[in-house]
Image (cartoon, grey):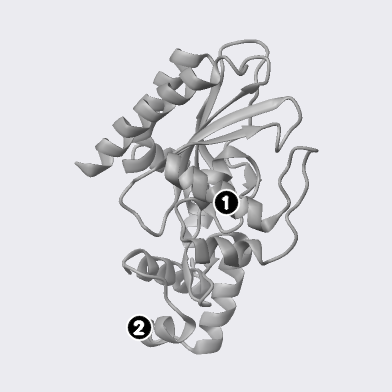
Amino acid sequence: MNRENNRSMVKLKRVPAVDKCFTILEDLAGSESPLGISEISTRLGLNKSTVFNLLYTLVDLGILEMTPENKVRLGIKLYTLGRKAVAGGNLISKVRPFLEEINQLTRLSVFLGLRAGMKAVIIDKVDSPDEVKVSSALGMKIPVTAGAGGKVLLSQLSDTQVGEILSKGPLPKFTPSTCTNPKRFLQIIQKARQEGIALDDEEYMVGIRALAIPLVIGRPDLQAAVWLVGLKSQMGDEKIPKLKEHLKKIGAKIDAQFAL
């Protein structure tokens, strides 16, 4: 009997824990709001301790995110794991042409990111065509309190929500220009919310500047942003006003795509 026939005689077994994990994920995907352990247990007829252990594992892996109310929702890692599928989906497919437009106008690297708890996660990008450039890997996680992208992601939250994030510990100091004062940082977020754009002037990395805009994608539970990054020599003071103008105009066009 050959090896192929031997394989056909093997009795395959489904793994119950995997079945339960995907049942939970499907239930969360169909819910309009985050769910708690008791809610999931009741809705799916699963033991509470089983649900707790599965949720703990999925949260630890980044597949799910925990809310301040101790409920769970789908996590950003699903976007990065399924990037090829997402690329044909709503968010990346709609934003990608505008990333390319920004890149062509500025010759700088441009990124699309989402907030995942205390991190900004890059889910798409277009690198600068120049040899000297700033680049980051897809899936890279950046502290949400760092850089222009984090500022506009936080600007989409209420002051109360931002305050809760800032209360979780001292603000890290990345460079001499980093703001570590919570009160001042909240004012920076408020300014970004008011102006619809934020600047990172060597606050995350020395010699690097960035501009970012928030995206209105019709998902109050999901904060998205586009940010433009370059060397300070590539984003001199004289260039910042024009770059802001380009970015805000294209941002308005992106928002319009999600308003359709």
Expressed as whole percent of the image width and height from the top left, the position of residue 226 reads 47, 35
Most foreground residue, 74 or 200: 200
Residue 97 rendering spot, x and y as whole percentages: 36, 25
Q: Residue at x 55, y 75 (%)?
A: 54
71 left or right, relative to 98: right
The residue type indicated by label 1 comes to Gln
Q: Nearer the viewer, residue 171 or 73?
A: 171
Q: Residue at x 66, y 10 (%)?
A: 131
Q: Say if residue 178 shows up in the picture.
A: yes
Earlier in the chain: of badge 2 and badge 1, it is 2
Tell me: residue 197, above or below residue 114.
above
Q: Which residue lies under the disc numbered 1?
A: 187
- How many residues crowd around disc 2 within 10 Å: few (fewer than 14), some, or many (20 or more)? few
Q: Tell me the amino acid under the disc marked 2.
A: Arg
Give the residue at x 44% y 21%.
102
User: Secondary structure beneath disc 1?
Assistant: helix
Horizontally, residue 242 falls left or right of residue 204, namely: left
Secondary structure beneath dot 2 equals helix
User: Do residues under tags 2 and 1 come within 8 Å of each other at their CB atoms?
Assistant: no
Q: CA distance from mark 2 to mark 1?
A: 42 Å
- Mark 2 highlights which residue? 43
Whether residue 82 is visible: no
State whether residue 240 is above or below residue 55.
Answer: above
Q: From the viewer's perspective, is 96 left or right of 67? A: left
Whether residue 233 is situated above or below residue 95 in the rendered picture: above
* Place of residue 4 in the rendered image (x, y in percent of width and height, measured from the top left): 50, 49
Q: Residue at x 51, y 81 (%)?
A: 51
Rate crowding at label 1 as few (under 14), some (14 to 19) or many (20 or more) other CA atoms within 10 Å.
few
Of all residues, the one furthest to the right in this rendering is: 176
